[in-house]
Amino acid sequence: MLVYLFRQGRTDDFAITTDVTGRNIPPVTSSTDWLFVEALDTSIFATPWHIADFQGVLRGLRVFGYYILGADC
């Protein structure tokens, strides 16, 4: 699955989405600005950021089209 990584401004908050534009990622605050970082192919992509349940992230992507990762992930 091809997914797209976005970062919220200069924070450590990230979102992964199936939408290349990132428009489906809801704002976290009224001033949220999601910035594109890179495209990732999950079939060849190693589990990132020590996420304990990356399969849960993939399930969220399939259901909602996006998944928000906070700085504590």
Image (cartoon, helix red, strand yellow):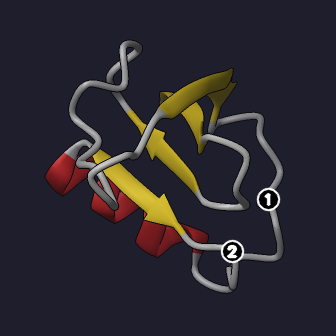
- Disc 2 marks which residue? 71
Q: Amino acid at mark 2?
A: Ala
Q: Position of residue 56 (x, y in %)?
A: 43, 74
User: Mark 2: few, some, or many residues within 10 Å (few <14, many ≥20)?
Assistant: few
- Disc 1 marks which residue? 48
Residue nearest the observer in this picture, 48 or 73? 73
Q: Residue furthest top?
A: 21
- Among the 4 quarters of the image, the one containing residue 13: bottom right
- Residue under the image location 16 percent in, 55 percent down: 63
Quarter in which the C terminus is drawn = bottom right
- Residue under the image location 77 percent in, 40 percent down: 45
Q: Earlier in the sequence, mark 2 or mark 1?
A: 1
- Residue under the image location 37 percent in, 46 percent down: 31
C-alpha span from label 2 to label 1: 13 Å
Q: Position of residue 47 (x, y in %)?
A: 77, 60
User: Mark 1: few, some, or many residues within 10 Å (few <14, many ≥20)?
Assistant: few
Residue 10 position (above or below residue 33): below
Residue nearest the observer in this picture, 47 or 35? 35
- Residue under the image location 69 percent in, 74 percent down: 71
Q: Secondary structure at mark 1?
A: loop
Q: Amino acid at mark 1?
A: Pro
In the picture, measured across the screen, residue 41 lies left or right of residue 59, that is right
Q: Secondary structure at mark 2?
A: loop
Front disc: 2 or 1: 2
